[in-house]
Amino acid sequence: MQIDWESLRATALDVMSRAYAPYSNFRVGAAALVDDGRVVSGCNVENAAYGVGLCAECGLISDLIAGGGGRLVAFTCVGGEGEVITPCGRCRQLLFEHGGNDLTMETPAGILTLKEMLPQAFGPDNLGP
Ligand code: THU
């Protein structure tokens, strides 16, 4: 599948502009292509109880599941200046559940696979049949 990274990044940039980040002032927008052609996205949503804030990827996964599920094929994530950033460790795990090792990711170091960003990931296969 051909990935239009510019378009995906534009979606991430758009949703980033609606982030709720009054505590860190660090807005994040994430967007991903699904294997059926859908594009899903999310922004970070902070909370006065700091620890319960939601990363942008949480919203993206919710968008994926609420929209019918599917497998993530390509992912990008931007910060408040539109710069490409990498997902935190927890969010790499969220992405692994729905994209697996082959999910392609735009990073500051170029296009990498999730396997490269989260080696030897623990996932559904580890739980057995
Ligand atoms: N953040 C994300 O939304 N995704 C990440 O992968 C990294 C961190 C958010 C959480 C918090 O609202 C802000 O960025 C600063 O950490």
Image (cartoon, rainbow, N blue to C red):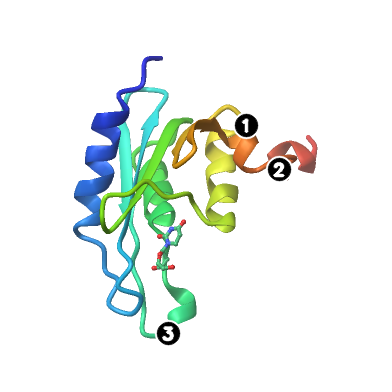
Query: SS for tag 3?
Result: loop
Sequence-wise, which precedes: disc 2 or disc 1? 1
In this rendering, the answer to whether 35 lies above or below 58 is above
Gap in angstroms between the C-alphas marked 1 and 3 = 33 Å
Q: Residues within 10 Å of mark 3 (few under 14, many from 20)?
A: few
The answer to whether mark 2 and mark 1 are in CB contact below 8 A is: yes
Residue type highlighted by circle 3: Ala
Quarter residue 3 falls in: top left
The answer to whether mark 1 and mark 3 are in CB contact below 8 A is: no
Displayed-image quarter of ligand 1:
bottom left
* Residue at the spot of label 1: 101
Residue 7, position as x, y percentages in the image: 24, 31
Q: Is mark 2 within 8 Å of ligand 1?
A: no
Left or right, 39 with reference to 102: left
Sequence-wise, which precedes: disc 2 or disc 3? 3
Q: Which mark is residue 121?
A: 2
Residue sitting nearer the eye, 51 or 64: 51
Residue type highlighted by circle 1: Asn
Residue type highlighted by circle 2: Ala
Q: Residues within 10 Å of mark 2 (few under 14, many from 20)?
A: some
Q: Residues within 10 Å of mark 1 (few under 14, many from 20)?
A: some
* Residue at the spot of label 3: 49
Residue with the most extreme front position: 109
Q: In the rendered view of the protein, which quadrant contains the N terminus?
A: top left
Query: SS for tag 2?
Result: loop
Q: Residue at x 28, y 38 (%)?
A: 9
Left or right, 121 with reference to 56: right
Residue sitting nearer the eye, 55 or 119: 119
